[in-house]
Image: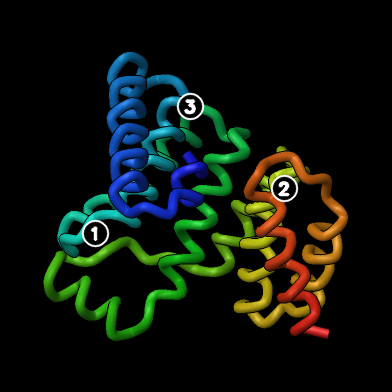
Amino acid sequence: MSASNRLADKNHKRLSIERAYAFAKRAFQADSTNGDTTYAMAMASCKMTDIEPENKKIVAYVKDVKQYADKALSINPNHAKANYMLGKWHYEMANLSGIKKTAVRLFYGGLPEGNLEEAIKYMEKCKALEPYFVSNYLDLAKAYKDNRQPEQAMEVLNKLVKLPIRTTDDVALKAEGVKLLEAMQ
């Protein structure tokens, strides 16, 4: 589904994400006890937040991301990407501005709280389970940096830049990691 991020045309991107969401939903309906299909729903819900214009629906998708990631981990606690997804969710929630948090609480009933320690915990587990997942390294470094742990952030970034390129997205992610590392030195 990361291919949708590379689509320049907004309509094509929307269609790609909507198709992926529909596919994930059918897979989940076919087997809701499978960690992979449950993770796919978490990831698809996350992607839907990128294209949904209505704030109330965005909040619902954000809640779904956590719900499906939690369920995937209850099925398989060692699902690397579900650990990453939950870590990323915590990271995003911890970084919502106070104004956005207040608005979400007032107008949409709020969201569960996220925190950087939980983000780091889940992303560290992902790193141990899937040591070549570049996205996780970059977000883990950002979480450490935001949590005022620059040594750990730099350690993760130094490992990130040495990882092999395995996906099309890895090139840009590694370049972003290099820039972050240079800015921290």
Give the tally of numbered discs: 3
The x and y percentages for residue 55 are 18, 64
Please report the residue visible at 58 percent of the width from the left and 40 percent of the height from the top. Answer: 81
- Give left or right: position of 133 versus 28: right
Instruction: Give the Cα separation between the discs numbered 3 and 1.
Output: 23 Å
Relative to 167, say whether 37 is above or below: above
Chain-order first, disc 3 or disc 1 = 3
Q: Residue at x 56, y 60 (%)?
A: 119
Select label 3 or label 1 by which is in front. 1
Residue beneath disc 1: 59
Which residue corresponds to mark 3?
35
- Comparing 67 with 9, the one in front is 9
75 displayed left or right of 66: right
Look at mark 2 in the image and give the residue it sits on. Answer: 127
Which x, y percent locates residue 113? Answer: 37, 66
Disc 1 is placed on an element classified as helix
Of mark 1 and mark 2, the one earlier in the sequence is 1
Kind of residue at disc 3 = Gly
